[in-house]
Image (cartoon, rainbow, N blue to C red):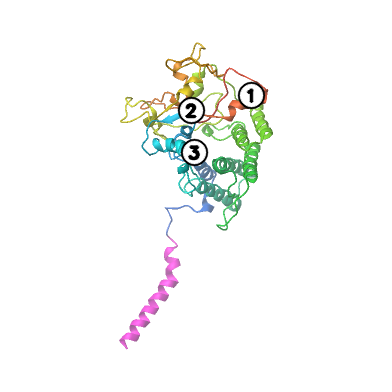
Amino acid sequence: MKKIWMNTSCALLAIFLASSCNDWLDGVTQTSNVSDEVVWKAEDNVDKNVNAFYRYLHKYGQFGEGQFRGSLTESLTDAFKYGSVSLGDRAGHPNNYVVNPSVVTPDGCLYNVWSKDLAYGDIRKINQFLDMQKQYSKFSAEKNALWEAQARFFRAFVYFQLAKRHGGVVLYDALPTSNDKALSTAEATWQFIADDLDFAAAHLPKEWAAANAKGRVTKGAAFALKSRVMLYAERWQDAYNAADSVEKLNLYDLVPQYADAWKGNNKEAILEFDYNKNTGPNHTFDEYYVPQCDGYEFGALGTPTQEMVETYEKSDGTTIDWTLGTAKPQRRHPMQTSNRASQLPLSMPVAHGRAKQWIAVWVEQTVLLWLIANNLTRMERPLRGIFFVNC
């Protein structure tokens, strides 16, 4: 009898808990997560989601870790080298790749961006945003197009990181429904990127009117990135057309003083990512590359090569030759520098510990942008589209 009573009591308790569970939870407010639907209730929430994509400019830029685990990819060229033979990031790994390329394998490539923590993880986040937009957004078509244009700009930007390494990759324009999608051709991959950038260029403004919109991607940024992408794709006419579209915006020009070009916030800057030492975002670039005696326990891990230095001219217009005891023909470069402090883009002064930190990474295709758009054979110095500058 006692056993029957215990079984009956347990059964009644289970029924009570099952029937009252929902009522008991009705008054609980969730505070740790926000549902996808709630995000699309207010413009500010959507803007904050879009803002997260702008971090990719840092992540895959010179100050981030996405390109080569912190090492500069210039170290794989004759323009820049690290001084260590010991294997490590910002040390011997790049040198080892140059002299011993057999160590680069599909499973062990340090400049791979394929993983879920890098390109494909970022692409999934962008596609999730676009998917949620289609499901939940009740905003105007104009607002939706502006958000979508920013998202697709960054999807193209991330896919570019993959395409310039691999050519054809697996393409997702929505959240995946399986894990066995086929590899696309290189042609299809470049066209996918071009389509995203065309949409971005069509719907992004030439300039943002809002005071707090500084640094957002623009029509010019979309055209400039497409010009660069199409050079990799060897689609020369498309590269020309995109470059010409940048010029026709009449927004960008050379600044009078070459040194000022690297400070950002000027007419040479097509897109900037701003850093702030005190409030963030920030970086530790200066710790690795300023002279070791300049306030850190280490520094000067990498430096421009002599070949890089000798492509510049002195402030008086004469050529630089650091070769001792030999005479050789001097190469000339169209860049005319205003002083020695501004001669090396990779050794620009970094004002650590003060209000401003800055260094610039120029967009290579903009050297060609004005050349091909204006059919020029030479110029005083190239226009740099500064994609990443911290001021």
Taking depth in this image into account, of 46 and 379 the one nearest to the observer is: 379
For marks 1 and 2, give the one nearer the viewer. Answer: 2
Does 231 sit left or right of 341 as displayed? Answer: right
Label 3 sits on a secondary structure element that is loop
Which amino acid type is marked by label 1? Leu
| Residue 382 painted magenta | no
| Marks 3 and 1 in Cβ contact (< 8 Å) | no
Q: Main secondary structure of the magenta part?
A: helix
Q: Residues within 10 Å of mark 1 (few under 14, many from 20)?
A: some
Q: Are marks 3 and 2 in contact (CB under 8 Å)?
A: no
Q: CA distance from mark 3 to mark 2?
A: 20 Å
How far apart are labels 1 and 2 at the CA level?
A: 22 Å
Magenta extent: 1-27
Reading the image, the residue beneath label 2 is: 79
Q: Mark 3 = which residue?
A: 60
Identity of the amino acid at label 3? Tyr
- Does residue 156 appear in this view? yes
Q: CA distance from mark 3 to mark 1?
A: 27 Å
User: Is residue 41 in sight in this rendering?
Assistant: no
Q: Label 1 belongs to which residue?
A: 371
Which sits in the foreground, 367 or 75? 75
SS type, badge 1: helix
Q: Is residue 68 found left or right of 153 in the rendered image?
A: left
